[in-house]
Image (cartoon, rainbow, N blue to C red):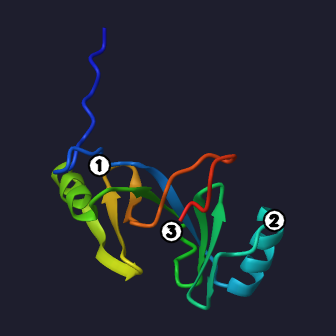
Amino acid sequence: MVAAVPRSLDSKGLPVFLGLRTVIYPAPDLSEAKRFATRMLRVEPYFDQPFYVGYDVAGYEFALDPNADPQIGATTYWGVADVDVAVAELLEHGATIDRNVDEVGDGIRVATLHMPAIGVLGVIENPHFRARTVDGPGPGR
């Protein structure tokens, strides 16, 4: 019988990882990527700026970043209650910093780390996000 692995908890007793939140795709040609994504997703972006375009898709963010490196590919961000606690825990497990904790606006804080044998993992602390189901109440952020 395999013993259950205890979930990592932050200082408030909450799980460090709260679930998937955002996937950011490199979009060097942002206007073409936005046209494609809008048709594909059948929804207009909720955030549309020359430096970032974000769509709310069933409570999760599908995002386009013209400054992201296409050779690295998409970056997935996992929701966390406290980005500093999550980064500290990931560093304890052997991760290394890719991008330090940064506030990207409106109280949203992100960081990316290189995970051994996995690649880049993003963490996001978003005080405006409320997880929901496809049929549940919105908006997700």
Residue 34 is marked as: none
Badge 3 marks a residue whose secondary structure is loop
Judge whether residue 74 can be spotted in this image. Answer: no
| Crowding at mark 1 (Cα within 10 Å: few <14, some 14-19, many 20+) | many
* Residue ID for mark 1: 16
Return the residue at label 2: 42
Q: Nearer the viewer, mark 2 or mark 3?
A: 2
- Disc 2 versus disc 3: distance between alpha carbons? 27 Å
Mark 2: few/some/many CA within 10 Å (<14, 14-19, 20+): few
Q: Secondary structure at mark 2?
A: loop
Tell me the amino acid under the disc marked 2: Arg
Residue in view at x 20 percent, y 57 percent: 91
Residue drawn 40% across the image and 50% down it: 118
Can you tell which quarter of the image residue 106 is in? Answer: bottom left
Amino acid carrying label 3: it is Ile
- Residue 93 in the image: x percent, y percent? 20, 48
Which residue appears farthest toward the front when viewing the image? 137
Residues 14 and 17: in front is 14
Query: Which quadrant is home to the N terminus?
Result: top left
Secondary structure under tag 1 reads loop
Is any atom of residue 39 visible in this view?
yes
Report which residue position mark 3 lands on. Answer: 72
| Mark with earlier residue (3, 1) | 1
Image height of 31 relative to 89, above or below = below
Number of on-image labels = 3
Amino acid, disc 1:
Val
Residue at 31% over, 51% down? 116
Question: Which residue is the extreme one toward the top?
Answer: 1
